[in-house]
Amino acid sequence: MRQTRFLTIWASVSIIFSSSCKKAEKPEAAEIPAEAGQIEIQGETAGPAAPLLFKLDGKADDWAGITPFWEEVGPAGSGLGENSIDIKQVYFKNDPQHLYVFMRISPTIEERFKKSPTGDIIGNLFLDTDNSPQTGSNAAEGMESDAYRGYEIRVWIPVGVLTGSSGESSPTVSYEIYTHEGGFYALSVDRQNTMDEGSLIAFGPDGVEFALRLEAMRLTVPASFRAMLDQHAAAAGDQGYSVGQLTLEAPK
């Protein structure tokens, strides 16, 4: 049975492009410090950010020769509407500091925005970081399926709309990393948005590309754990998710 969604869909997300509004809209718990090259994780400031393995630009060029982890997430097509985003391929790669993700999607963010300049949700990536279904989330969190049991990390990937002072709009993509604490995915430890300078997420002509900080997810390499991607575009009643065993390799 298809899970009951526990998210509020961003039917349309409009953000006024001014520094005062952006400051007011950021929850204090997920505030990212302004100091260049510093990251804050659960109240602790880490050292300078390491150079990225990939240029984050939403292009598939860097991923040539890497085998997709998922060729299709859930059923093909956009079941929730003609403008829903279908995840066609998902690639993973890691270095000692980051887990990189590239999602080839159809339509692309730009193509979808031309047809429907509104917000949406690409999906949720769940990680069972201790590789045990007996710990972490449970099926009582608004879900009907046991498939959601046992995950400690949820990465929410929404699409938003940025409206500038001139009245012109453009799409944005973001992610939020949540940890499972006290029975809920209630603690956001990292947020990234394409509207922010130095963001760890980008979209382009082939899809969406982003880097997740391993420290934020309490992961170190090497590691092997269960991963599930829940695609929002799946029609109600369909199994809109794919599961696999993801391995993070130690540097050679």
Image (cartoon, rainbow, N blue to C red):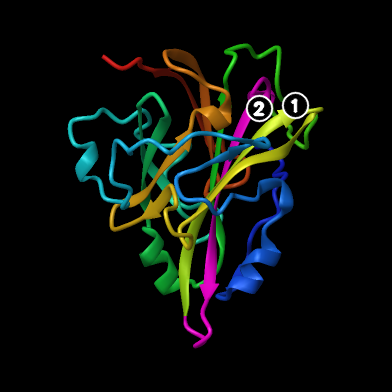
State which quadrant residue 176 falls in.
top right
User: Callout 2 environment at 10 Å: few (<14), some (14 to 19), or many (20+)?
Assistant: many
Residue 160 visible to an observer of this rendering = yes
**Compared with residue 174, is residue 126 higher up or lower down, i.e. above or below?**
above
The residue tagged 1 is 139
Which residue is rendered at x = 62% and y = 11% of the image? 132
| Disc 1 residue type (three-letter) | Ala
- The location of residue 175, given as percent across then percent down, is 54, 47
Name the image quarter holding the N terminus: top right
Residue 84, numbered circle: none
Q: Does the magenta run of residues contain 165? A: yes
Using the image as rendered, state which of residue 61 and residue 99 is in the foreground: 99
The residue tagged 2 is 148
Which residue is rendered at x = 48% and y = 18% of the image? 220
Q: Does the magenta run of residues contain 140? A: no
241 left or right of 110 in image: right
Q: Earlier in the sequence, mark 2 or mark 1?
A: 1
Which residue is outermost to the bottom?
166
- The location of residue 228, given as percent across then percent down, is 53, 28
Q: Which residues are magenta?
A: 146-168
Name the image quarter holding the C terminus: top left
